[in-house]
Each structure stands twice: as structure tokens, then as C-alpha cells.
Image (spheres, grey):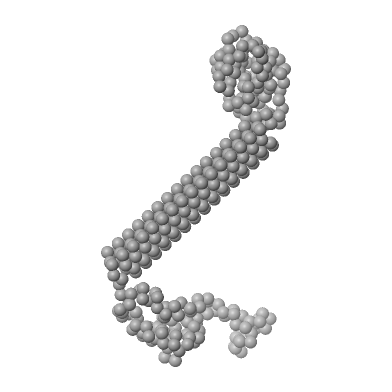
């Protein structure tokens, strides 16, 4: 019984040192054995390229085995082989792919230059997703490998847009993150440059709190280590704003160079601090022509055309302008701060309260 198949030849129509021509019939007086004796071919055209480069310079032909045929998985051997016709490369691409417009092989998807893709427009291999230059991706648009997510340049990501590896989160440059936007590794939180953080925005490691540059903090904004409180530069504190270690009570703060009964928490929550935070920090102010002095008009004649000019303001200028706009009650809030000292206040802010 005749068996139809395909065979690939080198550019000079040789195979394993034997010269062939097309069309033609060739016979060997042997008992064929796969990979040992006989002339070899494959029933499936794509299987031929397990043994030959997928190269358009090679010849691909339809063949019929008329003699004894030995088979082993995807390869056959015979002692009588007819070369029926050479297959043009464009037809080869159609034969080895069930997808359309593929330059690769064994693709069931369309427009693939890679091999064995069920997705479309892949230059990589073995992708079930689309538009991948990497390999074995079920996601889309990946240049990395083994990604189920999309747009990853790293490998093995189920999340999206990761340049790192093994991330289930998104946009991570680090590795093994379930959180997002991490440059560190093994973070379940977000935006961490450190490692193993369940909190967010930590540059330190192993923090369950947020914004820590130290390590192993359950509190927030600590530069020290192992703090459950907040904003500690020391270690092992359950309180906040401590630069020492093993403290459970918040330290008292100095104001105007003298001790007070206030903690930093008192200061942070007081009305005076809220008022001071309203000082404008912009170094520029636009002065309209109608508000300019004669001296300003002489210095900035272009204002006649532009309608005004940008005036540079110092921090002290902004502070004095803020003070001038405060109500009497708000000024008294500032003046009632513990240990208030007018000279120190002027030295730091530029505001002379003695003019009031």
C-alpha cells in the first residue's frame, strides 16, 4: 500500500549524502528502519522541520512511499520513494500552518512569523495570545515569556505591563510582586522600592506600614526600624516622633528654643500650624499695570504692552503678605504659642509683630 508524505532536501537536492532529483523514483534494496536504514519522510509537512531548518532555500517535495514502510512517531522510512513534485515555499507556508498569512510554521493563528502560535500576529513561538514577540504567552503584546498578563517585558507575569518577573500585580520593575508599581521584590503593597512590604511607598524592607525608609515597621513614615508608632527615627518605639529606642511615651518638643509641655502630635494638630501652612510658597507674583507703582513702571516699561509684570517674591515677602491678611483672632493664635518670642519669629519668618 502506498503512503503519501513530505520530504525536505538541502539546496542541492541531497539528503544524508544521497543525491535526488525531482521528479524521480528511488529504490534501495534494504529493510527500512527509522533513523537507521532507508529513505526518510514525514506524513505531516510540519514534522519535517523537526529535522531540517525552516529555510526557504531548502527544497520541500510531495513524496509517495511504494515499498516497505517503517514508522516511528512522526517519522517514516521506506525502501522505495517517489518524488512527485516540489512544493513552492508559499504553498509550504499554507501546508504547515492552519492559520493564514503566516511565515512561521505550525501556527493555527493568523499572521504569525513565529512558530506554533494559536494566537495572531506573533513573532515569538507557542503563544495563545496575540502580538507577542516573546514565547509561550497566553496574554497579549508581551516581549517576555510565559506571561498570562498583557504588555510584559518580563517573564511569567499574570499581571500587566511588568518589566520584572513573576508578578501578579501591574507595572512592576521588581520581581514576585502581587502589588503594583513596585521596583522592589516580593511586595503585596504598592509603589515600594524596598522588598517584602505589605504596606505602600516603602523604601525599606518588610514594612506593613506606609512610607517607611526603615525596616519592619507596622507604623508609618519611620526612618528607624521595628516601630509600631509613626515618624520615628529611632527603633522599637510604640509611640510617635521619637529619635530614641523602646519608648512608649511621645517626647516633649522645644519651641522658641525652650522646652514645652507639647508633643509633636500637639503641634501637628494645632490651629497655629494650620495657619502657618497657608503661607504662599510661590516665588513669583503677577502685578497688574493698574497696581504698579511709578518706580515699577519705570523699571518695567514692557508692562505698558503686557499689562503687568512678574515680580519675584522672597519667602519673607510671602510671609509678611500672609500676616497682613490675617484677622486679629488668627494673629492671637500665633502669638499665643508656647514660649512665643517676637525676635526669633522675625528672624525665621521675616514678620515683625511689633508693628501691630
On-image quarter of the N terminus: top right
Q: Residue furthest left?
A: 246
- Of 309 and 157, which appears nearest the observer? 157
> Which residue is at 39% across, 60% downward?
209
Residue 351 visible in the shown view: yes
The answer to which image quadrant residue 355 occupies is bottom left
Relative side of 256 to 26, left or right:
left
- Residue 346 drawn above or below residue 131: below
The answer to which image quadrant residue 244 occupies is bottom left
- Of 237 and 85, which appears nearest the observer? 237
The image position of residue 273, as x and y in percent, is: 42, 78
> Which residue is at 41% across, 61% downward?
210
The image position of residue 9, as x and y in percent, is: 65, 22
The answer to which image quadrant residue 13 occupies is top right
On-image quarter of the C terminus: bottom left
The image position of residue 213, as x and y in percent, is: 39, 60
Q: Residue furthest front?
A: 1
> Which residue is at 66% across, 14% downward?
2
Total marks placed = 0
Relative side of 299 to 237, left or right:
right
Residue 352 visible in the shown view: no
- Residue 259 drawn above or below residue 207: below
> Which residue is at 45% across, 80% downward?
275
Relative side of 181 to 131, left or right:
left
Relative side of 196 to 95, left or right:
left
Amino acid at each position: 500500500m502506498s503512503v503519501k508524505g513530505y520530504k525536505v532536501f538541502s539546496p542541492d537536492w541531497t539528503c544524508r549524502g544521497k543525491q535526488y532529483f525531482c521528479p524521480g523514483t528511488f529504490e534501495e534494496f534494504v529493510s527500512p528502519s527509522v533513523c537507521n536504514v532507508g529513505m526518510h519522510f514525514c506524513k505531516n509537512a510540519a514534522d519535517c522541520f523537526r529535522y531540517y531548518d525552516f529555510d526557504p532555500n531548502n527544497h520541500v517535495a510531495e513524496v509517495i512511499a511504494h515499498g516497505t514502510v517503517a514508522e516511528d512517531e512522526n517519522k517514516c522510512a521506506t525502501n522505495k520513494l517517489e518524488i512527485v513534485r516540489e512544493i513552492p515555499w508559499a504553498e509550504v507556508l499554507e501546508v504547515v500552518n492552519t492559520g493564514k498569512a503566516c511565515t512561521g510554521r505550525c501556527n493555527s493563528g493568523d499572521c504569525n512569523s513565529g512558530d506554533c502560535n494559536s494566537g495572531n500576529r506573533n513573532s515569538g513561538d507557542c503563544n495563545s495570545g496575540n502580538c507577542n514577540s516573546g514565547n509561550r504567552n497566553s496574554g497579549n503584546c508581551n516581549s517576555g515569556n510565559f506571561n498570562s498578563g498583557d504588555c510584559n517585558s518580563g517573564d511569567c507575569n499574570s499581571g500587566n505591563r511588568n518589566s520584572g518577573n513573576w508578578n501578579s500585580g501591574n507595572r512592576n520593575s521588581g520581581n514576585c510582586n502581587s502589588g503594583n508599581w513596585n521596583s522592589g521584590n516580593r511586595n503585596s503593597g504598592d509603589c515600594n522600592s524596598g522588598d517584602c512590604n505589605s504596606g505602600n511607598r516603602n523604601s525599606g524592607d518588610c514594612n506593613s506600614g506606609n512610607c517607611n525608609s526603615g525596616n519592619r515597621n507596622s507604623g508609618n513614615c519611620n526612618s528607624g526600624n521595628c516601630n509600631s508608632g509613626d515618624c520615628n527615627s529611632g527603633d522599637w518605639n510604640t509611640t510617635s516622633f521619637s529619635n530614641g529606642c523602646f519608648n512608649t511615651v511621645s517626647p516633649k518638643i522645644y519651641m522658641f528654643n525652650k522646652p514645652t509641655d507639647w508633643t509633636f502630635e500637639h503641634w501637628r494638630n494645632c490651629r497655629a500650624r494650620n495657619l502657618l501652612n497657608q503661607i504662599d510658597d510661590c516665588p513669583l507674583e503677577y502685578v497688574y499695570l493698574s497696581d504698579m507703582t511709578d518706580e515699577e513702571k519705570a523699571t518695567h516699561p514692557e508692562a505698558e504692552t503686557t499689562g503687568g509684570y512678574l515680580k519675584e517674591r522672597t519667602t519673607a515677602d510671602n510671609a509678611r503678605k500672609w500676616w497682613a491678611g490675617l484677622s486679629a483672632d488668627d494673629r492671637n493664635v500665633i502669638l499665643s504659642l508656647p514660649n512665643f518670642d517676637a525676635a526669633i519669629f522675625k528672624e525665621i519668618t521675616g514678620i515683625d509683630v511689633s508693628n501691630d
